[in-house]
Image (spheres, grey):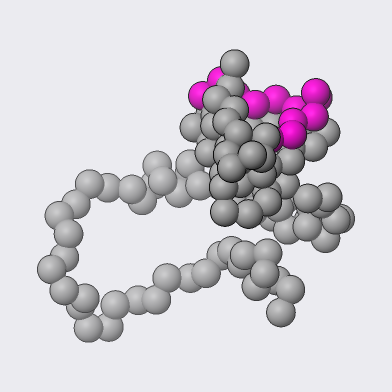
Amino acid sequence: MANIFSFDGFIPVIHESAFIHPNATVTGNVIIGRDVYVGPGAAIRGDWGGIVKDVSDEMLAWKTDGTALYQALPARLHATLHACEPLREVPSGRAQQQLSYKTWRETQS
């Protein structure tokens, strides 16, 4: 059984077709709809405002692009992730990191 908690009188609403992993936590003013998957270690907190709304086709396309980035991440990590000692100051001429992802709000402006 997942960790489901009411908070400040708000009880999460979870559709019967949704899957909430037993190691996930859902708290407060949260509404989880049809066929939603909440994975292990996730914490969905509706303690400072409401969470989960209908998703438009535009939002789904944005999410699909984000999923593709995560699917490509393991290969990048295998190729470039190395243990290191931290630098103590920013070197002059340090390259700027390329932005490969925009938040939903950034795509709306």
Residue at the image position 29 percent from the left and 77 percent from the top:
94
Bounds of the magenta segment: 12-23
Q: Is residue 94 above or below residue 25?
A: below
The image position of residue 49, as x and y in percent, is 63, 54
Q: Is residue 68 above or below residue 12?
A: below
Towards the viewer: 57 or 30 = 30
Q: Quadrant of the N terminus?
A: top right
Q: Is residue 2 magenta?
A: no
Residue 103: x and y in percent read: 62, 65
How many numbered discs sit on the rendered protein?
0
**Which residue does the image show at 48% across and 70% down from the upper left?**
98
In the figure, residue 15 lies in which quadrant?
A: top right
Q: Residue furthest top?
A: 1
Please name the predominant secondary structure of the magenta segment in the image: loop
**Image quarter of residue 14:** top right
Question: Where's residue 16, x and y in %?
Answer: 80, 23
Observer able to see residue 52: yes
Q: Is residue 45 above or below residue 34?
A: below
The structure residue drawn at horizontal position 20% and vertical position 77%, both measured from the top left corner, is 91
Q: Nearer the viewer, residue 96 or 52?
A: 52
Q: Is residue 14 magenta?
A: yes
Q: Quadrant of the C terminus?
A: bottom right
Q: Is residue 83 above or below residue 92?
A: above
Report the residue that reaches farthest toward the right: 57
Horizontal side of residue 46 vs 35, given as left or right: left
Residue that appears at 66% across and 40% down: 10
